[in-house]
Amino acid sequence: MAGEGKKVWMDGEFVDLDDAKISVMTQTLHYGFGVFEGIRCYKLTNGGSAIFRLKKHVRRLFDGTKILSMETPFTEQQIIDAHVKAVQVNGFDECYLRPIIYSDIGSFGLAAINPTRAAVIAREWGTYLGEGALERGVRVKVSTFNRHHVNVGMVQGKICGQYVTSILAKREAIKDGYDEAIMLDTEGYVAECTGENIFTVKDGVIRTPPTNSPILPGITRNSVIQLASDMNLEIREERFTRDFTYLADEVFLTGTAAEVTPVREVDNRAIGAGKPGPITQRLQKAYFDVVRGNDEHYKRWLTVI
Ligand SMILES: Cc1ncc(COP(=O)(O)O)c(C=O)c1O
């Protein structure tokens, strides 16, 4: 398949992609009981490549295993090293990395505690929300599907099975002619998108839902908050309503896959002038400067290959 790395790290060794197979009896396949991550490796402006915030992603991966009480036979350092090697072995200078920790074959049934396995896949992945999304912005709609109630989904982790709702919301949005879906929480406030956190800008104040609401604590979200405060921009972590997004001057989304993507329309209403706003553009530029190694201060976020 075009774009897929030829070698996959599985349980401590690299195997050919064609041999990287699991059994149909794998417990995670049936029940979604597993955790994964999405991580990007970028080509640096001055040569070489670096994985962005690798340690923080691997920490969140292990946080997910703790939430699920999954025993994993690997240390965080072994999984970190596996990512670096996955980039090198596959010869990528820029790629998307997908670790997954899953529950293997053993007993069948919900009570079964089966051996835990791990894999790291490397592949190419361009602009996630479509051609021109980063430059022109995307059109989004509020989904008919809610983000999980905090006692239904364990929202602090990237738990495999939780993405069923994200897929439903994403497919609904695409079928209805939009690029992405905004998911409300079960109280009706804006939570996040299917694979991105959401921000608004109104009268110079940036707002994003807090991490004690049902959102994934996004690593791009965290990076953008730090960049915004470095710029002395006012940023508040607070809930807001869907109609607040209609009236915002700017809306943008953050995520490893989506990076910093402007939103030009919500529910068929133009946001601001219907094109990326100045604060979004500044933060987007700052983000790309960081991931491409042009910001000395944030070189500490890069794992150079
Ligand atoms: C539901 C959800 N929200 C937000 C994000 C953004 O998180 P990050 O910036 O860490 O990629 C993701 C992607 O991992 C996600 O799946």
Image (tube, rainbow, N blue to C red):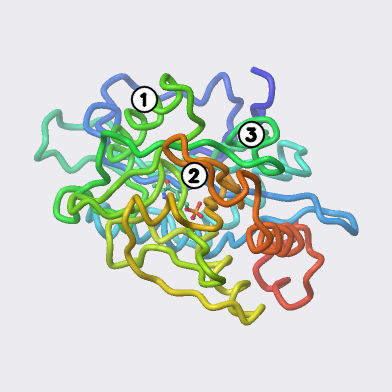
Q: Position of residue 150 (x, y in %)?
A: 19, 56
Q: Looking at the figure, which quarter contains the C terminus?
A: bottom right
Q: Looking at the figure, which quarter contains the N terminus?
A: top right
Q: Position of residue 260 (x, y in %)?
A: 61, 52
Front residue of 125/1: it is 125
Give how far apart the Cα atoms at labels 1 and 2 are.
27 Å
Q: How many marks?
A: 3
Q: Kindly indicate whether the residue at mark 3 contacts the one at mark 1 (C-beta within 8 angstroms).
A: no
Give the residue at mark 3: 123
Of the residues under marks 1 and 3, which one precedes in the sequence? 3
Q: For numbered disc 1, what is the local secondary structure?
A: helix
Q: Which amino acid type corresponds to the residue marked 2 in the rendered image? A: Pro
Dot 2, crowdedness within 10 Å: few (<14), some or many (≥20)? many
Say the numbered circle drawn on residue 285.
none
Q: For numbered disc 3, what is the local secondary structure?
A: strand
Say the numbered circle drawn on residue 99.
2
Q: Residue at x 42, y 53 (%)?
A: 245
Give the residue at mark 1: 172
Q: Kindly indicate whether the residue at mark 2 contacts the one at mark 1 (C-beta within 8 angstroms).
A: no
Of the residues under marks 3 and 2, which one precedes in the sequence? 2
Q: Is residue 74 left or right of residue 230?
A: left
Dot 1, crowdedness within 10 Å: few (<14), some or many (≥20)? some
Give how far apart the Cα atoms at labels 1 and 3 are.
26 Å
